[in-house]
Amino acid sequence: MDLKAADVVGSWRGRGEPLDYERKRLFSLRVQVENTQSGPRVLGAGPFTDEALVKVVVEDVDEPPKFERSHYVLEVKEDAPRNTAIGSVSAADPDDKRSPVR
C-alpha cells in the first residue's frame, strides 16, 4: 500500500468511508516500508524492510459551536477585584450532544 498523508485527511481510504468523530476517534494503520534499491555495500543482503504502527486521531472540527444567545453583553465595575467572574457564555457542540463546549 502506497500511503500518503493526504490519503487519511477526509476519508479512511483503507475502508473507503468518511472519517466520523462521533463513530470512531482513533484509527491504527500498520505501515510497512521496503528499500528495494540497495547500494553496492549491501548488494544481495536485502531487501530491507521495516514496519511501524501509525495512529490517526480524528478531531472534531467540522461544526462550529452553537451559542445559546446571538450576542452577550458583560459588564464589570472598574474597582472589581482581580479574578471576579463577570458572566458566562454557553455553547454546545452540534456534533455531540453529550459534549458541551464552555
Image (cartoon, grey):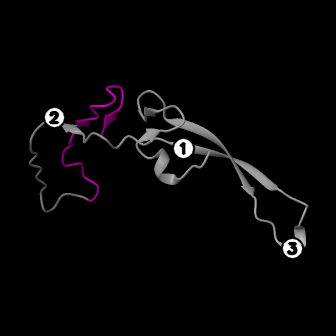
Q: Amino acid at mark 3?
A: Pro
Q: Which mark is residue 81?
A: none
Q: Is residue 81 left or right of residue 72?
A: right
Q: Amino acid at mark 1?
A: Val
- State the residue at coordinates (44%, 27%): 23
Q: Amino acid at mark 2?
A: Glu
Q: Quadrant of residue 72?
A: top left
Residue 79 horizontal/vertical position (percent): 15, 62
Q: Is disc 2 in contact with disc 3, using a CB cutoff of under 8 Å?
A: no
The residue singled out by tag 2 in the image is 68
Label located before the other in sequence (2 or 3)? 3
Given residues 31 and 37, the one toward you in this image is 37
Looking at the rendered image, the disc whose residue lies closer to the viewer, 2 or 1, is 1
The quadrant the N terminus occupies is top right
Q: Which residues are magenta?
A: 82-102
Q: Quadrant of residue 35?
A: bottom right
- State the residue at coordinates (54%, 36%): 14
The quadrant the C terminus occupies is top left
The residue singled out by tag 3 in the image is 40
The answer to whether residue 35 is above or below residue 56 is: below
Residue at the extreme bottom of the image, as rendered: 40
Q: Which mark is residue 56?
A: 1
The answer to whether residue 30 is above or below residue 78 is: above
SS at badge 2: loop
Mark 2 and mark 1: span between their CA atoms? 33 Å
